[in-house]
Image: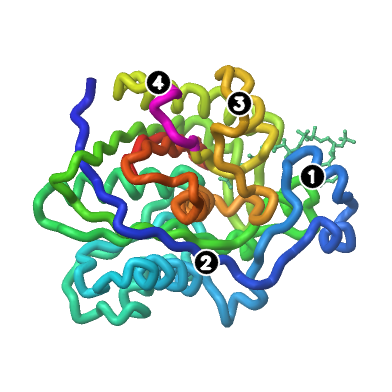
Amino acid sequence: MKKINNLKIISTGHYVPEKCLTNEDLEKIVDTSDKWIFSRTGIKNRHVIENPDIENTSDLAYKASLNAINKAKYDKNKIDLIIVATFTPDYRSPSVANLVQAKLGLSHKEIPCFDINAACAGFIYALNVALQMLNSGNYKSALIIGAEVITKFTDYTDRNTCVLFGDGAGAVILEKTLEDKPAHFFTASQGELDKLIYVDEFVHMNGKEVYLFATSILEKSIKKVLNDTNLSYNDIKTIIPHQANLRIIQTVAKNLGLDMSKFFINIGEYGNTSAASIAIALDEFMMSPDAKPNDKVLLVGFGGGFTYASAILTI
Ligand code: ACO
């Protein structure tokens, strides 16, 4: 059994752009239908930025962070580490985390700020890095964000991909704690599968191959963290999967013999927001009456790379 470290979730938040792109809107852009999209993916809506000159990944990340800070009335000056998981940064450099630091008015603080690109598994990767840094003893409070403006890289002439993606951001404030809040991570990658999903000017993917790989790797990742922690499904309050496709999650549930009620689902409203997806879902779960102190949540995701990751957190 691996070493388990404690991690306290102080607050969570999220932000999605106001503009909602419905399946009916997409019917007017490409040869598709609400019926096809919903039956194949579970998606009805996705929230998208209006204009990349006005709204970018760092803006969404900043608003999600403010939401988390304000909910807990948290003193933002305590934050001494900012990590953003994204594959759609405003610039190649500076990082989105640098821009968020400035927007939060924390530029006077000499704190590390950097981005992580592990596609849709990025938020779990970032939480794991934060845990290691908090446990180094050099940092006390981490702001971890998953944020994407995928619509900048979406080809709205390609019906195979454009119906899937939305923009958004989710944030979490973490502190090291002496309380019994064990956190455990599994983070992995299979680099030879780089061509299954890749992004140049636009997102490209082999949908069928991704689908098959995703179902098996999600199952494996869920079992791995449970085995490593000697926990069972009964110990887990909810499983928060990356929201890529409802049918992928349904297949995973069926193969694991679990009821769909065990899984937190919000894909219908947001589509696939990549690194933001688990972060947004975590915030929505934390705000729900189902979330009780000391519940264990299992996060699991996969994405371009191929990357995949899972975690068990104690809320
Ligand atoms: N509307 C209508 N028809 C469509 C659409 C659309 N939007 N897209 C594809 N089709 C057509 C295809 O052209 C094909 O037609 P054909 O049989 O005449 O060739 C038919 O529908 C069936 O296509 P399939 O690819 O077999 O459809 P499938 O059931 O596999 O569903 C989907 C496609 C939804 C993309 C699915 O494969 C999937 O979800 N894959 C995983 C995607 C994913 O999770 N990506 C993660 C990205 S994560 C990241 O890092 C960005």
Q: Secondary structure at mark 1?
A: helix
Q: Which mark is residue 38?
A: 1
Q: Which residues are magenta?
A: 232-239
- What residue lies at 60% left-to-right and 26% top-to-bottom? 259
Residue type (three-letter) at the residue carrying disc 3? Asp
Q: Secondary structure at mark 4?
A: loop
Q: Is mark 2 within 8 Å of ligand 1?
A: no
Question: For mark 3, what is the residue?
Answer: 259
Residue type (three-letter) at the residue carrying disc 2? Tyr
- What residue lies at 73% left-to-right and 57% top-to-bottom? 45
Mark 4 touching mark 1, by CB under 8 A?
A: no
Question: For mark 4, what is the residue?
Answer: 232
- Where is the C terminus found, in terms of image quarters? top left
- What is the distance, in whole Å, between disc 3 and disc 2 at their CAs? 29 Å
Q: Position of residue 125 (x, y in %)?
A: 36, 44
Mark 4 touching mark 3, by CB under 8 A?
A: no
Q: Residues within 10 Å of mark 2 (few under 14, many from 20)?
A: many
Residue type (three-letter) at the residue carrying disc 1? Phe
Q: Residues within 10 Å of mark 3 (few under 14, many from 20)?
A: few
Question: For mark 2, what is the residue?
Answer: 15
Residue type (three-letter) at the residue carrying disc 4? Ser
- What is the distance, in whole Å, between disc 3 and disc 1 at their CAs? 20 Å
